[in-house]
Amino acid sequence: MTNSKTGSFSVDYMEVSARHEKLGYDVTLFVPSKAAHRPAVRCFVNGKYYENISHLTYKAILDYKGNGNVVHAGTFFGDMLHTFSKSANMVFAFEPVLDNYILAKKNAQNLMLENVILHNAGLGEVNSILKVFTGVQNGVFAGGGSTFAHKSQANGIFESAPVFRLDDLPISDVVLIELDVEGFELFALRGAKAMIERDKPIILVEDNKKNCADFLSEMGYSFVFSTDFLSYWGSAGDLEFLQSLSKLYDENRDID
């Protein structure tokens, strides 16, 4: 176990290597030691990618859309960054939890992902500062399951983080928005309404409670399919491609 320091702040991490057999990707990452119980960290510790099928579909989307930009929110320790970086023009990544952000930044630097711009922030409907729930009082770190705080988490461990509205950021030519932000997806989408109307990106959201469906439908988007991790939405011009992508998913779902 090694210690990474940023100013007076430090994070304990493990250095691990993994291979994506289908894509032929090999990667060495720094993962948070205190999140060893989290599925993503467990996979990489065991030499395997987490969400293998997601990496496959991300590459397919970016190959189809061409040389555009990606918005990736809920970066955790940065396990998806190199896949996005390989095919995108620029990757705008957002991670509000400081521990996660430090390791994501260290991973981006170590992998020399020069087209990744990483923000220690979340995404929302308005620019603000919010409390982030990062664990419970017994010391169990939430890791990638960290959430913006709500009343039922009164006894948890918290830190403050800035929240940005995508429409206020200088980001254009967005071909893919991927949001895995633990229930805050709808707020992030509302803050990106102008971006969505302008760029018509493919949108992937973790939306187990279907909170985003009405908003996306009103924006002219159609739901196409879901994996175990994300729902895939597209505007009219991308629906045929997304139908073919659902077949790719069905043919390769066993790789996870």
Image (cartoon, helix red, strand yellow):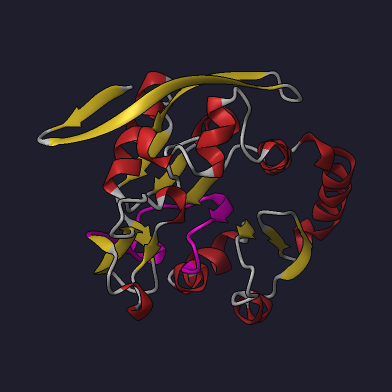
Camera-side residue: 139 or 106? 139
Residue 198 to residue 114: above or below: below
Image quadrant where residue 56 sits: top right
Tell me if 243 is positioned left or right of 57 in this view: right
Q: Position of residue 136 (x, y in %)?
A: 33, 60
Q: Residue shown at 26%/68% (left/top)?
A: 130
Residue drawn at x 78%, y 34% as measured from the top left: 255
Q: Is residue 8 left or right of residue 100?
A: left
In magenta stretch: residue 73: no
Camera sees residue 207: yes
The image shows residue 46 at horizontal and vertical percentages of: 59, 25
Q: Within the magenta stretch, is there residue 170?
A: yes
The magenta-colored residue range is: 159-184
The quarter of the displayed image where residue 213 is located: bottom right
Residue 60, x across and y down, in percent: 73, 38
Residue 75 as seen in the image, left or right of residue 18:
left
Regarding residue 83, the answer to whether it shows in the image is no
Please give the name of the residue rendered at 30% of the width and 62% of the height, measured from the top-left corner: 132
Residue 29, compared with residue 80, is above or below; it is above
Residue sitting farthest toward the front: 138
Q: Quadrant of the C terminus?
A: top right
Q: Position of residue 22 (x, y in %)?
A: 76, 25
Quarter of the picture holding the N terminus:
top left
| Quadrant of residue 63 within the rendered picture | top right
Q: Is residue 67 above or below residue 28?
A: below
Of the pair 5 and 122, the residue shown nearer to us: 5
